[in-house]
């Protein structure tokens, strides 16, 4: 079943994260502190180390890949919605190494900012809430 909302463009925040911060946690805090509960996130920059998730669809569990190395954030794309009453960010990243090789996956806590410039586009007029989905085992948007 498709879940869809019509939304209106809201505020746009642009900024830079703190050197040494946790990428996902600080982006989430920016949204929470600015009252953003629905939106779209983009960012680029570099990380000191990274933790990416890969969802094993058969076992319905995340596996985590740890990259203890300096990497470029070639792309970060994500969304903001609500889970358990709080804004949460679901983001995927493409990270590139010193030879331009790329790695990608689900952004997990444990990814440390070297430098990161972000843009959050907030949306108004609707809310999307995450709840457990039996088919996938994931916290997905539900009506
Ligand atoms: Zn994901």
Image (tube, helix red, strand yellow):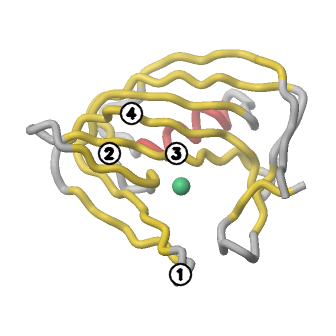
The residue indicated by pointer 1 is 58
- From the viewer's perspective, is 41 left or right of 44? right
- From the viewer's perspective, is 27 left or right of 76? right
Q: Nearer the viewer, mark 1 or mark 3?
A: 1
Determine which of the numbered discs, if any, sits on residue 112 in the image: 2
Residue at image x 35%, y 42%? Answer: 94
Give neighbour class at mark 4: few <14, some 14-19, many 20+ (Cα, 10 Å): some
Give whichever of 4, 93 is nearer the camera: 4
Residue at image x 32%, y 38%? Answer: 113
Work out whether mark 3 precedes mark 2 in sequence or the reverse, and give the earlier one.
3
Mark 2, secondary structure of its residue: strand
The residue indicated by pointer 3 is 91
Residue at image x 60%, y 18%? Answer: 13
Work out whether mark 4 precedes mark 3 in sequence or the reverse, and give the earlier one.
4
Vertical placement of residue 110 versus 80, above or below: below
Q: Is mark 4 in CB contact (under 8 Å) with mark 3?
A: no
Work out whether mark 1 precedes mark 3 in sequence or the reverse, and give the earlier one.
1
Q: Distance between the residues labelled 1 and 4?
A: 28 Å
Work out whether mark 1 precedes mark 4 in sequence or the reverse, and give the earlier one.
1
Q: Nearer the viewer, mark 4 or mark 2?
A: 4
Residue at image x 43%, y 65%? Answer: 54
Q: Is mark 4 in CB contact (under 8 Å) with mark 2?
A: no
């Amino acid at each position: 079943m498709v879940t869809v909302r019509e939304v209106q463009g809201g505020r746009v925040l642009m900024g830079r994260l703190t050197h040494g911060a946790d990428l996902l946690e600080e982006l989430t805090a920016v949204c929470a502190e600015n009252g953003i509960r629905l939106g779209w996130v983009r960012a680029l920059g570099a990380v000191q180390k990274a933790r990416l998730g890969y969802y094993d669809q058969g076992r319905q569990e995340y596996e985590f890949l740890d990259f203890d190395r300096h990497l470029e954030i070639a792309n970060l794309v994500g969304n903001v919605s609500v889970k358990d009453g709080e804004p949460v960010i679901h983001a995927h990243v493409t990270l590139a190494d010193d030879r331009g090789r790329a790695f990608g996956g689900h952004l997990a806590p444990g990814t440390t900012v070297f430098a990161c410039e972000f843009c959050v586009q907030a949306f108004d007029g609707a809310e999307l809430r995450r709840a457990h989905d039996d088919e996938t085992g994931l916290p997905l948007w539900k009506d």
